[in-house]
Amino acid sequence: MKAPVPEMVGQERRGSLRLQTLVRLRWLAVAGQAATALTVAYGLDFPMPLFPVLALILALALGNLVLSLHFPATQRVSPRIAFSLIGFDLLQLTALLYLTGGLANPFAPLICVPVIISFAALPLHYAFALLAFAVSGVSALALSPFPLPWHEGIILEIEPILKFGIWIAIISMLGFAAFYAQRITLEAQQISDALAATELVLQREQHLSQLDGLAAAAAHELGTPLATISVVAKEMARALSDDPDHGEDVQLLVSQSQRCREILGRLTSLSNEDEAHMRRLPLTSLIEEVAAPHRPFIAEMEIRVSGETSGEPVGTRNPGIIYGLGNIVENAVEHARRKVAIDALYSETQVTITVTDDGEGYTPDILPRIGDPFVSDRPKDPANSRAGGLGLGLFIAKTLLERSGAHLTFENAGGARITVSWPRWRMETEAADQS
């Protein structure tokens, strides 16, 4: 089954708004509109069509009250209902501005707020419909015959050229705000999806690392009941050894119970003898473990480990490091022509692993964004590519390695080159905390 495109995933998740969120925003709008209208009418004593204005504010308040009383606070609304509610808010605000000066009203830019909410929360076809409605509303405000509330006897006239400039400014603000809200929301969803995928990968790797401990625990728990079975089987064998019907079956039971005890004994021995070896990895063993699964897929894989000092780094087995380095090596193998080189260098203070392939490298437009979620690192060759994806591989690898204290750099050096470096003390000690 083909994986969904990230933009489509984001579209599917939009529109599931909590009603309480909209209700609270609308109560804030009611309070702000009422306070502004009363201040202008009674505080500044400016003439204005107060009753129609208050009627519009009251309509919004009553609609909000109905929603609050008839639906629970946790109610989620469908995209169509959210579109209707936000559309009503936009119509109500446009009517208020129309009655109070149109584009001359200093609060006219507030018409962008419902559009921003729609592009952040609704599917794009609903959001674009509201944007078109807002553009129509702004155009209608330019034709408003109602003057801006001002001192009695004074009509504040706005020159047509200035009014046109205000119209252009608000339309531009609508377009910019819509694009910005949509991109920010999409990127936030992508980061959330990618981090969730990272957590699942790390959880799987940790689960695999814990299987040896589970095997030892199972051997220990099964030892007592199996010993009981063996004792009972031997007693039955002594009693029924000459029985022509059941003697062979009892001997088979004894032999199989003994075989089970030998298997459990080997599991326990493996755990006791090799636990330290399995949990502690020298740098050379770490690289060999990472590289081994990918050797069959490349003509030549060269591994070089060198040190500026004696004493190779030995760290605790960290599933995040193993998976992250494995993903980088797999990526290099997938894009190489015939050779991948893995170079490791260690000193008293630093451990560095560099993976280089002889492929085409990163394209200039992709290189600055390598490691971001849903960014494919390089164009895949359909004839040689073994797998496809959504561009999460290097993001997950980068995230897991950075959790262990590593710093990653991506560059072109003939082919692609990825350098992973740790402070030596972090690789040797922090790996235990991260795993």
Image (tube, rainbow, N blue to C red):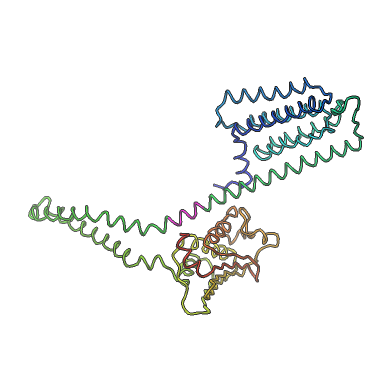
Residue 205 within the magenta-colored segment of the rendering? yes
Residue segment shown in magenta: 199-206
Point 73% across, 28% down: residue: 35
In terms of depth relative to the viewer, which is nearer, 318 or 231?
A: 318
Q: Is residue 250 magenta?
A: no
Q: Quadrant of residue 41?
A: top right
- Please state the total of marks drawn on the protein image: 0
Q: Main secondary structure of the magenta part?
A: helix
Question: In the displayed structure, would residue 165 be above or below residue 3?
Answer: above
Give residue 312's position: percent from left, percent from top.
Answer: 47, 75
Left or right, 364 with reference to 156: left
Q: Quadrant of residue 151?
A: top right
180 displayed left or right of 189 = right
x and y percentages locating residue 317 in the rendered image: 44, 64
Residue 143: quadrant of the picture: top right
User: Is 352 in front, or is 356?
Assistant: 352
Image point (54%, 72%), residue name: 350
Q: Position of residue 205 (x, y in %)?
A: 46, 57
Residue 92 percent coordinates (x, y): 74, 27
| Residue at 68% over, 31% down | 86
Residue 230 left/right relative to 350: left
Q: Nearer the viewer, residue 151 or 255?
A: 151
